[in-house]
Amino acid sequence: MTGHEHSQVEVHHKEGFIRKYIFSTDHKTIAKQYLITGIIWGFIGMILSWFMRLQLAYPNQPIPLLEKILGGWAEGGILKPEFYTALITMHGTIMVFFLLTAGLSGTFSNYLIPLQIGARDMAFPVLNMLSYWVFFAASVVMLISFFVQTGPAGAGWTMYPPLSALKNAVPGSGFGTTLWLISMALFIVSSLLGALNYITTTLNYRTKGMSMGRLPITVWGMFVTAILGLLSFPVLLAGAVMLIFDREFGTSFFVPSGLVLGGQPVPHEGGNPILWQHLFWFLGHPEVYIVLLPAVSIVGEVLATNSRKPLFAYKICVGAIIGIGALSMIVWGHHMYVSGMNPILGEIFVVTTLAISFPTAILIFNYLVTVWRGSLRFTPGMLFALGFLGLFIPGALTGAFLATAPVDIQLHDTYFVVAHFHFTMATAAAFGMFAGVYHWFPKMFGRMMNDKLGKIHFWGTFIGVYLIFFPMFFQGIAGVPRRYYSFTEYNFTSQFIGLNKFITIAAFIAGAAQFIFLFNFFWSMFKGPKADKNPWKANTLEWQADSPPPHGNWGPELPVVYRGPYEYSVPGAEEDYIPQTASIKVEAK
Amino acid sequence: MSQNQSKFHGLLFLFFFILGSIASVWVVLRNGWWLPELASDRETIDKIFVTIFIIAGILFVLSELALSYFIFKYAGDARRKAFYLPGTTKKEILWSILPGVLVVMILEISAEFLGGASIWGKIHGEPPKDAFLVEITGEQFAWSIRYPGPDGKFGKVDPKLISYDNPLGIDMSDEASKDDIVFPAGEGVLYLPLNHPVVLLIRSKDVIHSPFIPNFRVKQDAVPGMVTRTWFVPKKEGEYELACAELCGLGHYRMKSLVVVKPMEEVQEWLSQQTPAGDIYW
Ligand code: HEM
Ligand SMILES: [Cu+2]
Ligand SMILES: [Cu+2]
């Protein structure tokens, strides 16, 4: 497989602005397009969460400013409950799919795979460009849904029918949901185009000497992620098409007979709402690993480089990533313990879920050992990678509660779950993404980001995130259900009025820290100090290319690989790093 | 590079996790934030929860402290080279697999040994024959409640019969319907007998709902087109809240019902004072 020749050196004419920046087929430009679109989505998603937090902290208190911003959705300054459900739906969808799937995989799979395997571009550059533009179209459709009369989709990011299937069930289930489904269908097509490219490129375009066993952990992470996407996204696509049919053409895949909604009989017959849940979570669970694996692998790379140590037990780490990917396809039922699904099935999913924590624990432990006795260099990227570990640990440990079916009876659909997934998938993956941005920014843009601002950003975010989400575990333990517009209706929820104000303040502080990042990102892009080829003294191939690499990445000759990616601090070596292209012999004891 | 090798970050990590752990314990104890008081026979759930909580709590503190300590201790130093440890020898591989095995064993298998599988089986198994039956039906955004009456049988329902006067669509031609006691949406109370098994039959008229009684550790989705079921034994007299746990629309947050637990005689007496369906519908 190795040594696949692919060295037709393209002769470059000056490209026009449009070919160079807009409809570019260069994987590096496409990566940047994904990154910037992702950042925009991230900010939109975050601002939506501010509205939710305001409502939860000050239920029924008019906030005149809200009416100015949201108009009819907050008449008299009080958010409407139907808009709250639209907010959680859009926040969840945007964060999971648009920021942490497209934004994360789209950016780093595109940027890193060709550079780290020593290729000139993706296997199918035009498909790659299409993948971005289909994603862009999905983004536009999703954005438009904010402006339709009945508001954006409102049945939660999980879109459970009949709520999502019956147009009168909630205002958002009108035209907003139609747009949501169209947008998601486009989104899935885009992910599939991307995934095909990532897989093909990784398998066929590795340069001479780059065996699979010498791939950086990042490439392994993106590769397994792409396979997961390819296997699971089509199932959601099928589900989405069936849901569109139920809504528009009178079929009944998910809607049973005999329903009466708001006094009116519903004409559907013979469907089953639980079928949707199986289809949704068949993607939905792998999806959390589609979000997590790129982040986890970025973290591994950044940790090793900045600890100046080999990634501990590289082969086991790769095995763990493959194991997580494979097992993630057969655990979806743990989201459905109280759904009415066959209870024996529930027991089986307890076992598979138990099994997946095994590779996860190994991976995290190996990362800790990688840091142990290193010579740590605290770049902002490194801090975010360490922060990832700090956040993922409580997230993973609380998974043990939810995996245990009887305990999940109590905790399912409470704030315990909200806290759990925000630690594991949401903020941990966001930290992985930040680590990646800080680490590869010099390569991407040829300039360094500001170190001080990066560190302030890190600490504001890390502490902020803990203050926001850690208390939610205790709200969930006390039984507070999620997706609630206000906590004022029940005695067991109203005890948290004070805590909710506290969490909201923390959310605003953590959010403010993101604007420091925004400033740093765009300011450094133009004004940052120039970066040299290899500012972190790292081993992987991309650091042998110019910063930023030219179209085609390498000079006339493709790089040749002589060693694995993690030979840091090898005893007897002159420097504490040995690039993969170095052909010198160093005998480690 | 020197600022990138300072002990500052390690200290801050240590400080954050130590202070944070102490503050959390203090705040949680002071406010009594914990599981709601247990009022049913599902104490096994609490037992497993507490066990995992203790183990996970210890693992959390240990691993965060280890992480913070490493960050503090191994901050880069020009005079010291990192310890070369690729993790390729047999011994090292064992080292990396062992903790995974341990964590999984301790956390989850022990939880199952505490009776997880058996309580799961019990909850979903056959309830005792003499159990007290009650049916709860969700609709946007309230619960209807129905008791079977003296015959202990629910009458047939047919959605086609649903009307303003007959909100559950009870088929009055069925003999078993006549003595059913029906509370239309939002007007009923879940009156349950103390120390007596209760079977909750759960239905929905429109979208998915999920009756959740935190004090009982009871939650089971109400799925349109299906009847789901759960059973338990109320163990404490008193009043409890029933909430909806599955997003069902804009009123999801206020889809509440009252649960009252009284000795069996009082429940029977209360039921005998209610008007049976046969006297309201015809
Ligand atoms: C800026 C920090 C964030 C804050 C303050 C925040 C806050 C919230 C709030 C208040 C909810 C609604 C809880 C409820 O009513 O049930 C929520 C739901 C959710 N959040 Fe976040 N969030 C943040 C970041 C993220 C990120 C980065 C992700 C990425 C995966 C994410 C994913 C989700 C998901 C999937 C839901 C569930 C939506 C649903 O129930 O349909 N959040 N978040
Ligand atoms: Cu899952
Ligand atoms: Cu509800």
Image (spheres, coloured by chain):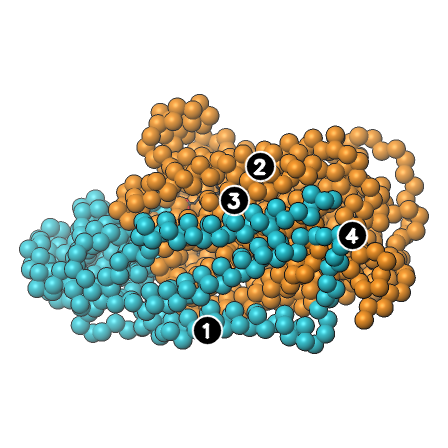
Chain colours: A orange, B cyan
Q: Is residue A158 visible to us here?
A: no
Q: Are marks 3 and 1 on the same chain?
A: no
Task: Tell me the element at label 2.
Answer: helix
**Between marks 4 and 1 in the image, the one whose residue lies nearer the viewer:** 4
Q: Residue at x 25, y 67 (%)?
A: B41
The picture quadrant where one finds residue B98 is bottom right
Instruction: Report the quarter where the N terminus of chain B lies.
Output: top right
Q: What kind of element bears circle 3?
A: helix
- Position of B133 with respect to A339 (left or right) is left
Q: Are marks 1 and 2 on the same chain?
A: no
Sequence-wise first label, 3 or 4 = 3
Label 1 SS: helix
Q: Amino acid at mark 4?
A: Ala
- Which of marks 2 and 3 precedes in the sequence? 3
Q: Name the residue tied to disc 1.
A: B109
Foreground tag (3 vs 1): 3
Q: Amino acid at mark 1?
A: Ile
Mark 1: C-beta under 8 Å from nearest atom of ligand 2: no
Q: Which residue is mark 3?
A: A463
Residue tagged 2 = A514
Q: If you read the primary sequence from the N terminus, does the residue marked by circle 4 or circle 2 appear first?
A: 2
- The mark total stands at 4
In the image, the residue with mark 3 has its CB under 8 Å from the nearest atom of ligand 1? no
Picture coordinates of residue B253, whole percent (x, y): 33, 44
Subunit of label 2: A
- The x and y percentages for residue A374 are 69, 58
Q: Are marks 4 and 1 in contact (CB under 8 Å)?
A: no
- Residue A538: mark in rendering: 4
SS for dot 4: loop
